[in-house]
């Protein structure tokens, strides 16, 4: 039987390669892995436990919050509180910073606890996304400003997709490692270490229903994707799950491009820089792909606020480079 390596074992093996490591980041990743298992269990029985449906409140973006969003938020915050390693959490579900364990922890965690939550009611993939930064100075008073770092300063990031299987991918800046949850063992099992995105893919992913809100350059690019040309495997296939974590996961494995542009409807795009775009850009770049807002690398954007949005075009290197030709044309 092929040796099974669990997420916990893998993280510890990786840590042992660095004799000076304190083990704190490893612990933090394991805590997130535990929360992901609990969320996965609830997601799978969401219908039968009557956990579906609107919770009744609105989140900081004025969107309806469903019970499972709150459940996932609570599970992740509670997992991150266990080890006194994390000083603050910034979540899609909380307007301000959430302080944990006083000022002691040296890590700052951003997260989207349940991405794509409109998919819950129809049993389509949803996800969790996380992004981890280290504090500059543990003795400083915690502040929102301290959390406003560009994505290049992430020390780790990852996502979980609750799909036909539950998968978890993470990076600490040394490649992307992918695990699948075996529900009978209750363990994430290593699929692949150092996953690479195909250099080119024939899938494009965007909410094309919003076509009339888009810039002319983007419209032309999408028409390019639809043209017939065997040499470049066009027309591309269109795929759009409506859960960025799941759409980016497919892009990681099969290549292509995922786009959530700015538009007359969403002048700054809709996806959040700090807990959607930066962590998924870190993953895709570590796998050999690219992520841009059209003008600059996503991870180099200097954030001005915790929940800000950005347009994003992310995927295989050759697809993003081709896309940029259309973008500069305008
Ligand atoms: P969320 O509030 O459930 O996290 O929504 C974010 C999601 C992304 O994952 C997805 O790509 C996008 O919003 C879908 O938006 P739209 O419905 O405009 O296509
Ligand atoms: Mg989201």
Image (cartoon, rainbow, N blue to C red):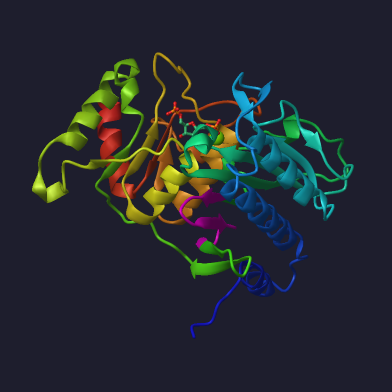
Left or right: where 189 falls relative to 249: right
Would residue 272 be seen by someone viewing this image from the given angle? yes
Q: Residue at x 46, y 24 (%)?
A: 269
Q: Which residues are magenta?
A: 159-177
Q: Position of residue 141 (x, y in %)?
A: 87, 35
Picture quarter with the C terminus = top left
Would residue 106 be seen by someone viewing this image from the given angle? no
Q: Nearer the viewer, residue 239 or 138?
A: 239
Q: Position of residue 199 (x, y in %)?
A: 30, 54
Left or right: where 86 falls relative to 248: right
Q: Nearer the viewer, residue 1 or 220?
A: 1
Q: Is residue 151 magenta?
A: no
Tell me where residue 152 sits by quadrant.
Answer: top right
Q: Residue at x 55, y 35 (%)?
A: 117
- Give the farthest residue toward the bottom: 1
Q: What is the count of numbered marks? A: 0
Q: Residue at x 38, y 34 (%)?
A: 259
The secondary structure that most of the magenta stretch takes on is strand
Q: Position of residue 62 (x, y in %)?
A: 61, 18
Q: Nearer the viewer, residue 30 or 268?
A: 30
Q: Position of residue 40 (x, y in %)?
A: 60, 52
On screen, residue 3 above or below 226: below
- Give the farthest residue toward the top: 264
Left or right: where 214 falls relative to 276: left
On screen, residue 208 above or below 91: above
Q: Is residue 174 magenta?
A: yes
- Give the farthest residue toward the front: 48
Tell me where residue 115 sits by quadrant.
Answer: top right
On screen, residue 102 above or below 221: below
Q: Nearer the viewer, residue 127 or 308?
A: 127
């Amino acid at each position: 039987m092929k040796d099974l390596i669990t997420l916990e074992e893998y993280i510890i093996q990786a840590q042992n390669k660095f004799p000076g490591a304190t083990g704190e980041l490893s612990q933090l990743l394991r805590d997130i892995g535990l929360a992901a298992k609990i969320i996965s269990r609830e997601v799978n029985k969401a219908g039968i436990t009557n956990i579906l449906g609107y919770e009744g409140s609105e989140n900081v973006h004025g969107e309806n919050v469903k019970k499972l969003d709150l459940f996932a938020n609570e599970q992740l915050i509670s997992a991150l509180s266990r080890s006194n390693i994390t000083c603050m959490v910034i979540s899609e579900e909380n307007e301000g910073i959430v302080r944990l364990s006083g000022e002691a922890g040296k890590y700052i965690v951003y997260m989207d606890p349940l991405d794509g939550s409109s998919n819950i009611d129809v049993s389509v993939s949803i996800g969790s996304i996380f992004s981890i930064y280290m504090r500059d100075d543990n003795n400083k008073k915690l502040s929102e400003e301290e959390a406003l770092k560009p994505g290049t300063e992430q020390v780790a990031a990852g996502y979980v997709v609750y799909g036909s299987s539950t998968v978890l991918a993470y990076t600490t800046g040394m490649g992307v490692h992918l695990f699948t949850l075996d529900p009978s063992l209750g363990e994430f099992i290593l699929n692949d270490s150092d996953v690479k995105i195909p250099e080119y893919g024939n899938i494009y992913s965007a909410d094309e229903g919003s076509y009339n809100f888009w810039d002319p350059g983007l419209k032309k690019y999408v028409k390019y994707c639809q043209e017939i040309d065997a040499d470049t495997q066009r027309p591309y296939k269109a795929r759009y799950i409506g859960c960025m974590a799941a759409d980016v996961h497919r892009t990681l494995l099969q290549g292509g491009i995922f786009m959530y542009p700015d538009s007359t409807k969403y002048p700054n795009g809709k996806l959040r820089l700090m807990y959607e775009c930066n962590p998924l850009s870190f993953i895709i770049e570590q796998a050999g792909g690219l992520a841009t807002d059209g003008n600059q690398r996503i991870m180099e954007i200097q954030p001005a606020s915790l929940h800000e949005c950005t347009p994003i075009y992310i995927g295989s290197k050759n697809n993003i480079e081709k896309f940029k030709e259309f973008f500069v044309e305008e």
